[in-house]
Image: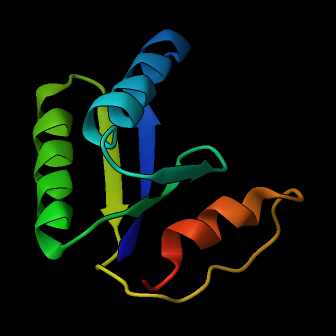
Amino acid sequence: MHFAITVEIIANDQRRIAIENHIWNNILGRHKRARRMTNFYVVQIFDEQDWHTVKTAFTNYVNSQTETIRFVMSPVMIGGRYDGVLPQGSWDYINEITEDR
């Protein structure tokens, strides 16, 4: 199981980096995840409760910040493949996350 999330952060460079680090390390830290492009993440989860936990953590964090932060989460997905144009080797880890086990 997995989901995709995209995040928009409107902040100066120093704060944007701090916010991105908090998202990566604290909110998504316990999940296998791939960050591709600026703020697009593919996140492995084990059940729908994980999705709700991440959504709640994102919402609480966003609402506690003075900067403008927006995010969109996909529904929980099982299997499937992402497609697009990324550098060579970028797909292997995404495919590992999205494999239906």
Q: Residue at 67% x, 50% y: name it.
A: 37
* Residue 35 spot, x, y in % from top left: 57, 48
In the image, residue 94 sits, relative to residue 66, either above or below, namely below
Q: Residue furthest right?
A: 88
Of 16 and 53, nearer the camera is: 53
Of 101 and 45, nearer the camera is: 101
Horizontally, residue 99 falls left or right of residue 73, namely: right
Horizontally, residue 73 falls left or right of residue 10, namely: left
* Residue 23 spot, x, y in % from top left: 35, 35
User: Toward which corner of the image does residue 38 lie, by quadrant?
Assistant: top right
In the image, residue 95 sits, relative to residue 6, either above or below, namely below
* Residue 87 spot, x, y in % from top left: 86, 56
Q: Residue at 28% x, 30% y: name it.
A: 26
**Tag count in the figure?**
0
Horizontally, residue 36 falls left or right of residue 48, namely: right
Q: Residue at 49% x, 20% y: name it.
A: 17
Q: Quadrant of the C terminus?
A: bottom left
* Residue 100 spot, x, y in % from top left: 46, 86
Q: Residue furthest front?
A: 101
- Asked whether the viewer can see residue 62, the reply is yes
